[in-house]
């Protein structure tokens, strides 16, 4: 049901998983840290069965064919550029966009900068960047939650995450993600240069300029047990959406929504698409 494909762009070749008819309505799904395209295995399969053309790439740094060494090559501008380049390579004029964690941040920025390309937006966990900025200024709890983003810029982070059979890396998933996926993530990020490339997303610095409001149809899904993003940023996100907006709060679920409750996540995506 799921194919493994390559997406050729000027930046290099992105590995991806895909499902559904080639002429189906296109959906691009963006994974987070420290994951990969297989985060979306369930959703890609379900979308394919429902007639959509679903593609989930291993993003910049996660695909060996697009793994520049310099942190400056991992800015939001580069990451959004990759989304547009992949859509162009796939022959998609417009597409539905889904993201989680860092992939959610890239999805927000893509919808902000290229609203003419994004038909609908579905984001799990990550609030609108403007909402997060507000929360970081006004909410001490969010500032504490986000401290890791600064800590991970330290050059000792790779060793710390991979020491003791990658204990710290595995612990991040809070035993909410199936072990086979965790093992694959660890194996991939243990390859030379792979974890540094993934961490370069944090080291590249903040985006230039302030985030505008999003005009496309949007669904934002936040879980009450999310360790990274608190309720202030979650509730603030609505103020940054000018188009049709739906907020879904999921009780007793961790940050890893697409993998912890894959069936429910797939249903929510389909509802927003329809």
Image (spheres, rainbow, N blue to C red):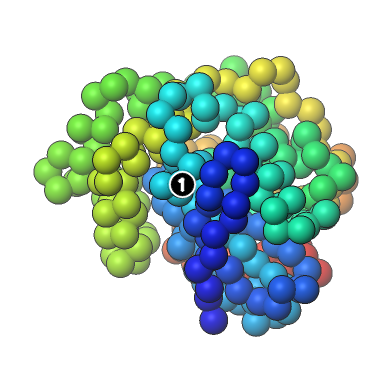
Please name whichever residue, 42 or 192, is drawn nearer the observer in this view of the structure.
192
Number of numbered discs overlaid on the protein picture: 1
Which residue shows up at 50% across the image and 22% down it? 72
Within-10-Å neighbours for mark 1: few <14, some 14–19, many 20+: some
Please name whichever residue, 84 or 228, is drawn nearer the observer in this view of the structure.
84
* Rendered location of residue 190, percent (x, y): 25, 46
Which residue shows up at 63% across the image and 22% down it? 207
Mark 1 falls on what kind of element? Answer: loop
Please identify the quadrant where the N terminus is shown. bottom right
The answer, for residue 102, to whether it is visible in the render is: yes
Please identify the quadrant where the C terminus is shown. bottom right
Residue assigned mark 1 = 65
Residue 268 horizontal side relative to residue 187, left or right: right
* Rendered location of residue 171, percent (x, y): 27, 48
Q: Tell me which corner region of the image, top left, top right, bottom left or bottom right, holds residue 119.
A: bottom right
Q: Is residue 108 above or below residue 142?
A: below
Q: Is residue 172 above or below residue 112?
A: below
Which residue shows up at 21% across the image and 33% down it? 160
* Rendered location of residue 208, percent (x, y): 66, 18
Which residue shows up at 53% across the image and 73% down it? 3
* Rendered location of residue 203, percent (x, y): 44, 23
Please name whichever residue, 35 or 13, is drawn nearer the observer in this view of the structure.
13
Residue pushed farthest left? Answer: 164
Q: Is residue 20 above or below residue 189?
A: below
Q: Tell me which corner region of the image, top left, top right, bottom left or bottom right, holds residue 233.
A: top right
The answer, for residue 224, to whether it is visible in the render is: no
Residue 151 horizontal side relative to residue 58, left or right: left
């Amino acid at each position: 049901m799921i194919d493994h494909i390559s997406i050729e762009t000027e930046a290099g070749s992105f590995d991806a998983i895909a499902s559904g008819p080639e002429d189906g309505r296109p959906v691009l799904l963006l994974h987070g840290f420290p994951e990969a395209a297989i985060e979306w295995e369930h959703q890609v399969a379900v979308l394919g069965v429902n007639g959509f053309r679903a593609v989930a790439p291993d993003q910049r740094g996660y695909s060996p064919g697009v793994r520049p060494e310099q942190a400056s090559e991992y800015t939001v501008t580069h990451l959004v550029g990759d989304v547009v380049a992949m859509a162009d390579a796939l022959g998609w004029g417009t597409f539905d966009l889904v993201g989680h964690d860092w992939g959610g941040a890239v999805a927000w920025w893509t919808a902000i900068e290229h609203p003419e390309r994004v038909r609908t937006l579905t984001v799990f966990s990550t609030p609108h960047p403007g909402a997060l900025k507000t929360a970081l200024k006004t909410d001490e709890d969010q500032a504490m939650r986000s401290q890791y983003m600064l800590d991970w810029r330290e050059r000792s982070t790779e060793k710390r995450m991979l020491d003791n059979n990658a204990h710290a890396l595995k612990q991040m998933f809070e035993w909410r993600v199936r072990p086979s996926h965790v093992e694959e993530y660890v194996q991939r990020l243990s390859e030379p240069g792979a974890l540094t490339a993934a961490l370069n997303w944090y080291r590249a610095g903040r985006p230039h300029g302030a985030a505008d409001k999003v005009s496309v149809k949007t669904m934002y899904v936040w879980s009450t047990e999310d360790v990274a993003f608190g309720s202030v940023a979650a509730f603030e996100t609505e103020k940054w959406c000018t188009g049709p907006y739906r907020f879904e709060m999921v009780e007793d679920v961790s940050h890893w929504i697409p993998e912890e409750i894959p069936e429910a996540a797939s249903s929510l995506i389909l509802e927003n698409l329809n």
